[in-house]
Amino acid sequence: MAMRQTPLTCSGHTRPVVDLAFSGITPYGYFLISACKDGKPMLRQGDTGDWIGTFLGHKGAVWGATLNNEATKAATAAADFTAKVWDAVTGDEVLTLAHKHIVKSVNFTQDSSCLLTGGNDKIIRIYDLNKPEAEPQEITGHTSAIKKALWCNNDTQILSAADDKTVRLWDRNSTEVVKQLSFDMSVSSMEYIPDGEVLVITYGKTIAFYNALSLDMIKTVDAPASIHSASLHPDKDFFVAGGDDFKLYKFDYGTKEELESYKGHFGPVHCVRFSPDGELYASGSEDGTLRLWQTAVGKTYGLWKCVLPEELVSENSDTIYCTTAAPEIKA
């Protein structure tokens, strides 16, 4: 029998959703933050999409957002030339970090003591959050805007992707480039998986997997459309991707076979990420919504409840319907 995917739609944003990130698993579950061009990043319960709160304070589009593992701190990167650090429990603004241009990327160290930023001024910055008055450490070398900067290798190295068509691996202490990848077009997204040191990069219609420490290629997969973002399942069984054709694609990581594709968004998909338990993946789109999709369609999880009432299943039916308690979650 075929299973019908029923995504949860999280509305509330008024402009395109351009970035999202999950926290780790906490005693209170896990959480999801979204960055949006409306300048109002939102925090949600990760497994249900329920709105928790909105971080208010930016005066421009928010291009990047992240949570620390414990979901106690949030950070955002915006077009108002600032990155902000927030108390994710109270929603209060903790710190504003002034930059010289649009900030696109923010990333916490594992202990949440330092924040990594990158943006249109082509400079990677490391802020010591325990010494907010201190000048940040700066790393230069990219020749175009930085799209993403991420800690890796237990926070001893940094991965960055920029519009100069390169991905670079930096040593944190020496600030020197350890390795570099060059492409024939700009990289559209980059995800780092600490478990196994896997780097997921998208460019054009290609989803590429690299060893994050050596930058040796593991494999590449061609998608049916131009891809803006991809994410690898925590168990590395599957990966998902989304892009220009409004669809979400799910592939087998081992065989590279396309397993499923779903259309739910009404605009290009800008970002997609698996939850930390791998039970769902979230997507953000030009249509201003987030959607949550089940990894294993039909499993009872979160707001999804799989039921087979006898009256719904006829002799000619080849579809099992997995219902949700609340198909649209509003802010």
Image: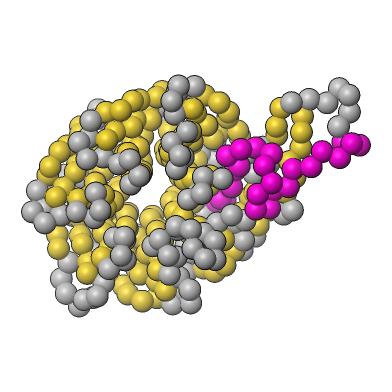
Q: Residue 137 in the image: x percent, y percent?
A: 14, 63
**Relative to residue 174, is residue 278 depicted above or below?**
above
Does residue 219 appear to the left or right of 170 in the view shown?
right
Which secondary structure dominates the residues rendered in magenta? Answer: loop
Nearer the observer, 43 or 35: 43
Residue 157 falls within the magenta-colored stretch: no
Does residue 277 appear to the left or right of 116 in the view shown?
right
Check the picture and name the quadrant holding the C terminus: bottom right
Could you say which quadrant of the image residue 97 lies in?
bottom left
Please name the residue shown 64% across and 44% down the image: 7
Residue 298 falls within the magenta-colored stretch: yes
Q: Residue 32 in the image: x percent, y percent?
A: 50, 57
**Relative to residue 317, is residue 40 depicted above or below?**
below
Could you say which quadrant of the image residue 124 lies in?
bottom left
Residue range (magenta): 286-312
| Residue 241 visible in image | no
